[in-house]
Amino acid sequence: MKSTLLISVIVFVIFIFSDVNHATEKIEFGYVGVKGPAFWHLLSNNSAICQTGKKQSPIDITSEDLETLAVPPPAKFLDAKMVESTHNGNTVEISSGNEEVPLPAEITIDGELYKLQQFHFHTPSEHRINGRYHDIEQHLVFKSEDEKISVVAVFYDVGDEESAFMTPIIENLPMNVGDKNEIEEIGLSNLLCDIKNITQAYTYSGSLTTPPCTEGVTWYVNKDSLTVSVDQLLGLRKVINFNSRFTQLRECEEGEVHTYKKKRSTLYSRSHFRK
């Protein structure tokens, strides 16, 4: 009897720990080959939604979508000091260096406070506007107390002037996977001013653009792009290379009016939504 009870306890403990490990599983992915976006749904049981999801991101946003811009969420951005820049193998991520300490920026959605966990970059952009991509897309990832996620997307294109916001980031880029560099200060308050307090943005409910492609993410995609210099773009691209997921076809909820217009490439398709 005792031996049977002992075996049951051991099996129960093994089950619990295996379940925890599965829940916290880190999915290794990339942007080319068998670990690229076309195969993300095969990398883990948790990432099956990358293929089966109905509200996946990124999407191609049309002029019709932008006729009705988002109601901007109240936002407060303070300059971030002594932050950490990390090369995680797929992008450069800027954070406080402590998972329990957010960066000094927040937005409020439907009365709920979201705090900035980290931001990172994609080259070229993942979202498109009328089929056109931008040189860089920055994702500012916010999280609420009950784990809801909202992402503010900011576009950058090459122009005559460099970006003052991007300067300390480019100057302190971690060159190799696993490298971490410290940045003395990043002007988040200037960024909020540059994107006009998120007043010119398109919003929709989508997903993370990396595995496990979790849905229920509230997106605010800024309409207009900011400017970076050629050297800034090349510096970032040298480190992160191509790291963009192709645009996704989506199925609308009941009551939404939608049309689909497929382009020649099945990987880059337009989905149009009118709220």
Image (cartoon, rainbow, N blue to C red):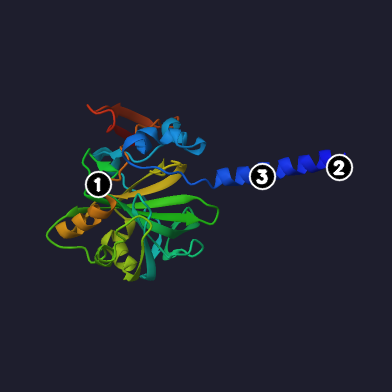
Q: Amino acid at mark 1?
A: Pro
**Marks 2 and 3: in contact by CB < 8 Å?**
no
Q: Amino acid at mark 2?
A: Lys
- Residue located at (29% from left, 31% from top): 267
Sort mark 3 into few (<14), some (14-19) or many (20+) by Cα contacts within 10 Å: few
Q: Secondary structure at mark 2?
A: helix
Q: Secondary structure at mark 3?
A: helix
Q: Nearer the viewer, mark 1 or mark 3?
A: 3
Image spot of residue 135 (x, y percent) = 21, 49
Residue under circle 2? 2
- Residue located at (24% from left, 28% from top): 265
Q: Amino acid at mark 3?
A: Ile
Image spot of residue 216 (x, y percent) = 47, 43
Q: Which numbered disc covers residue 16?
A: 3
52 and 149: which one is in front?
52
Q: CA distance from mark 1 to mark 3?
A: 41 Å
Q: Which numbered disc covers residue 124?
A: 1
Q: Residue furthest front?
A: 3
